[in-house]
Amino acid sequence: MDGDFGTWVPKVHPLARDAEAEDPFELSGQVSEGDPEVMLECLLQEFLWMGYGAEALWRLFDHPNYPLLTGLRERFGDAAIKNRIDDLVARCGIPTFRESIVESAEDVDEEEASGPMLVQIDCGVMERG
């Protein structure tokens, strides 16, 4: 990269700049180059890793807040999307999380109580039957 960004506006943190009347403070997207197959796979994996099951993943492709997923559905078709979801769930399973909260004062000494506490997360993958 040669550092010439042409007409790109330099990034400035929102708290470091003044509000301007013509700034709508709205998020907007731009079309960019890329492989739609890879994008679909990455998005499906991301939502799967957040704990979405096959049915919940499928419903996202109809949700108005996810126009990118709607576009991918139009590009690949319903059957292809459903097959990709089923294949991914079969290969990876659906992550599940368990939490244990210990509230006994005996389990926490004074030094630990005054500083940051370590919270261990046990992640497991549910097998698909």
Image: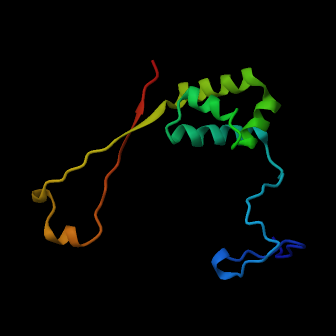
Q: Nearer the viewer, residue 49 or 100?
A: 100
Q: 27 above or below 59?
A: below
Q: Residue at x 69, y 33 (%)?
A: 61
Where does the image place residue 56, in percent across and percent down from the top left?
Answer: 57, 31
Q: Quadrant of residue 25?
A: bottom right
Q: Quadrant of residue 125?
A: top left
Where does the image place residue 17, in percent across and percent down from the top left?
Answer: 70, 81
Q: Residue at x 75, y 42 (%)?
A: 67
Q: 58 above or below 129?
A: below
Where does the image place residue 78, in percent across and percent down from the top left?
Answer: 74, 23
Q: Quadrant of residue 6?
A: bottom right
Q: Residue at x 52, y 32 (%)?
A: 92
Quadrant of the snapshot with the C terminus: top left
Where does the image place residue 105, in percent across and percent down from the top left?
Answer: 12, 59
Name, please, the residue furthest toward the top: 129
Q: Is residue 40 left or right of residue 87?
A: right
Quadrant of the snapshot with the N terminus: bottom right
Q: 7 above or below 78?
A: below
Q: Residue at x 61, y 25 (%)?
A: 87
Q: Is residue 123 left or right of residue 75?
A: left
